[in-house]
């Protein structure tokens, strides 16, 4: 089956997508999140919703890939001076701590802050991209990245950039096939301590070159 059979549409995020988006986000990065919160994945998903990490407000550059109305992939883009509304928690801090435990809330907030990257002017950065596990290998990731390239070019960006951990060889293979190259590799003790992943590659693709 290829993407044509699945009739994949890439569109901006809508408020009603939030539960599906939170589920796919946690499915995609579950191993990472489990290092931050000692909870089953469904609890981490509801924690994300209650913490307002996937809110109802539409963020610029937030896209979903759908097939027959079902969300199969998600992507968030970030760029310099992008306007982002502050996320609103759905529950009070007291309720969050009672539901999920103080340490889980503390470690999740600290860990996600650690993963936040600032973006250089002229760059458009893929903050996250993930495809539902049973829809991988069908070309949805490729379609999302192609969409990111078009969107970034419209923004006037020169480069599309992303970070990928050293152990994620399958994703690196995909990015290389799409023209990304590794610009920098960093070895972070802090990341190793928190996520048991120390190697992080910064990959870029030059949009002007690609479109000429
Ligand atoms: C990386 C990811 C977004 C790719 O999405 P996708 O829809 O499977 O990508 P495509 O179908 O367009 O391309 C598949 C390619 O990705 C690679 N790939 C990566 N992970 C794969 C997986 N779990 N299953 C199948 N292919 C995978 C394959 O090697 C394939 O390469 P090929 O086309 O040269 O054969 C997806 O595998 C995913 O969500 N992974 C988990 C989250 C993640 O690692 N995100 C990236 C963080 S930087």
Image (tube, rainbow, N blue to C red):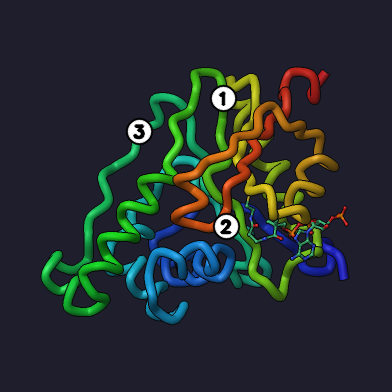
The local crowd at label 1, few if under 14, some if 14 to 19, many if 20 or more residues have their Cα within 10 Å, is many
What is the CA distance from the residue labelled 3 to the residue labelled 1?
15 Å
From this view, report whether residue 9 is shown above or below residue 155.
Answer: below
Foreground: disc 1 or disc 2: 1
Pointer 1: what residue? Answer: 123
Ligand 1 neighbours mark 3 (CB distance < 8 Å): no
Q: Earlier in the sequence, mark 3 or mark 2?
A: 2
Q: Earlier in the sequence, mark 1 or mark 2?
A: 2
What is the CA distance from the residue labelled 3 to the residue labelled 2?
20 Å
- Image point 48% across, 36% down: which residue? 78
Quarter of the image where ligand 1 sits: bottom right
- Image point 54% across, 57% down: which residue? 196
Q: Where is residue 139 in the image (x, y as percent from the top left)?
A: 79, 57
The local crowd at label 2, few if under 14, some if 14 to 19, many if 20 or more residues have their Cα within 10 Å, is many
- Image point 69% across, 27% down: which residue? 183
Q: Is residue 55 visible?
A: no
Q: Where is residue 182 in the image (x, y as percent from the top left)?
A: 73, 32
Q: Where is residue 178 in the image (x, y as percent from the top left)?
A: 81, 40
Q: Which of marks 3 and 1 is nearer the N terminus?
A: 3
Q: Judge left or right: residue 174 versus residue 37.
A: right
Choose top left, top right, bottom left or bottom right for residue 81.
top left
> Which mark, by number, is residue 74?
2
Residue nearest the observer in this picture, 34 or 4: 34
Pointer 3: what residue? Answer: 83
Q: Judge left or right: residue 16 versus residue 71.
A: left
The local crowd at label 3, few if under 14, some if 14 to 19, many if 20 or more residues have their Cα within 10 Å, is few
Choose top left, top right, bottom left or bottom right for residue 167.
bottom right
Q: Judge left or right: residue 139 versus residue 93.
A: right
Q: What element carries label 3?
A: loop
């Amino acid at each position: 089956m290829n993407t044509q059979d699945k009739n994949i549409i890439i569109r901006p995020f809508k408020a009603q997508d939030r539960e599906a988006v939170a589920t796919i986000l946690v499915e995609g990065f579950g191993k990472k999140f489990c290092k931050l919160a000692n909870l089953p994945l469904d609890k981490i998903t509801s924690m994300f919703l209650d913490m307002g990490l996937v809110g109802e407000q539409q963020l610029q550059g937030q896209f979903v890939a759908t097939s027959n109305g079902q969300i199969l992939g998600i992507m968030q883009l970030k760029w310099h001076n992008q306007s982002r509304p502050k996320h609103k928690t759905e529950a009070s801090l007291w309720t969050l701590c009672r539901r999920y435990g103080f340490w889980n809330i503390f470690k999740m907030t600290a860990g996600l802050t650690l993963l936040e990257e600032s973006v250089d002017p002229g760059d458009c950065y893929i903050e996250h991209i993930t495809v539902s596990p049973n829809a991988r290998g069908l070309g949805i990731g490729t379609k999302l990245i192609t969409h990111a390239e078009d969107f970034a070019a419209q923004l006037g960006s020169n480069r599309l950039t992303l970070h990928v951990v050293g152990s994620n060889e399958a994703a690196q293979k995909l990015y290389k096939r799409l023209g990304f190259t590794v610009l920098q590799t960093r070895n972070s003790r802090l990341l190793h301590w928190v996520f048991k992943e120390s190697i992080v590659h910064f990959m870029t693709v030059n949009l002007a070159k690609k479109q000429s």
